[in-house]
Amino acid sequence: MDITSIARSLGAAAALAAAALALAGCYELQAACGQLALSVRQRPIDAVIVDPATAPALRAQLAKVSGMRDFASRTLALPENSSYRKYVDVGPDAVVWNVYATAEFSVEPRRWCFPLVGCVPYRGYFSAARARRFAAELHRQGYDVTVQGAAAYSTLGYFADPVLSTMLGWSDAELAGIIFHELTHQLVYAPGDAPFNEALAGLVEQEGVRRWLIAQGREEELAAHLRTRERDLAVTRLMLQARQRLAQLYASGDEPATLRAGKAGIFADLRQDYERLREGWGGYAGYDRTFAAALNNASLLPVATYDQCLPALRRELDAVHGDLRAFYARARELKELPAPQRDALLCR
């Protein structure tokens, strides 16, 4: 990275750090420092590709990424900017760890509010240890908590988001999808409305991957990708059904002991339902770790956040006959609605 690029990165991150210090928040400061570390270490993808020290496998992957990035702007009408034009090696693990929490007898997330992004149903940490310490403190306060690693995240265009090493262990379809997903956050974002934002990005991800694979003449991979998506949807349905049952249980007003017993029974049913579903997958075990872990209210939050509003947005895309520019214009209209009205229209 040249001196000018480093200066720009340091200046942007320093401004974010200054804002964090003005808020007097340790959490905001760790986010600024984490972003600074990424900004300083990233290198232009073209430079990594031509570097003789670059491993051939990495060179090939990054060449594919460049093609995916061009497709995003030229064909999907996603932002043409510096995002996903640089690369940074953060190791094989997650880049951030998100902490989700609910009350013991609630399916509604605890929310945290920040400048620029509004209120969100999680807190993200660049350190797994910090995320787990925060989760442990919430647990001591009586919350249901889960910590989930993420291989990518979006700065909503405030920084040029890089390609991360954590993203390169996926299939080509998954890698293209995450690039399309995160760029959508830069295009349309409703502060404080995670279900709308994630469903919108998820839909563009799905449609973008479909169009990209067809353009590449890789229809067989598209069929395999769609089978994976069907498994995802089946698990999503199970989790949303369990979440609805829990909501009805908690609304009953029964004694805590009764609620705890009912809660345990619903999660036991969810595991059994998953085992029955899994029997038809021919040995696929992609969700086994999820269901082997301790399940609680918070475990169901990511599903509700990412998928609840997606079917209605799919109908909006169909209504404009797949014209993405027209769909983005409609998404911007929806973004301007009062949050309760948008939620009632799309996510109920």
Image (cartoon, rainbow, N blue to C red):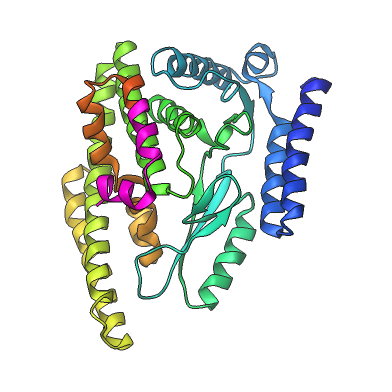
Q: Which residues are magenta?
A: 328-348
Is 155 left or right of 313, judged from the image as shown? right
Residue 169 in the image: x percent, y percent? 48, 33
Return the x and y of residue 94 as percentages of the image width and height: 55, 45
Left or right: 213 in relation to 42: left
200 in relation to 30, above or below: above
Relative image position of residue 131 (x, y in whole percent):
59, 59
Q: In this rendered view, identify the residue nearer to me: 251 or 173.
A: 251
User: At 69% across and 14% down in the image, what residue appears?
Assistant: 51
Quadrant location of the N terminus?
top right
Our reading of the magenta stretch's main secondary structure is: helix
* Horizontal side, residue 13 vs residue 296: left or right: right
User: Taking 220 as reference, is 269 above or below it?
Assistant: below
Question: Between residues 95 and 312, which one lies in front from this camera angle?
Answer: 312
Q: Is residue 295 magenta?
A: no
Residue at position x 35%, y 75% from top?
105
- Does the magenta run of residues contain 338? yes
Kindly indicate the quadrant of the structure image that contains residue 313: top left
Identify whether 87 is placed above or below 259.
Answer: above
- Relative to 21, is 66 on the left or the right? left
Please state the horizontal and vertical placement of residue 198, each as a whole percent of the image. Answer: 40, 42
Residue 209 visible at all = no
Is 323 in front, or is 139? 323
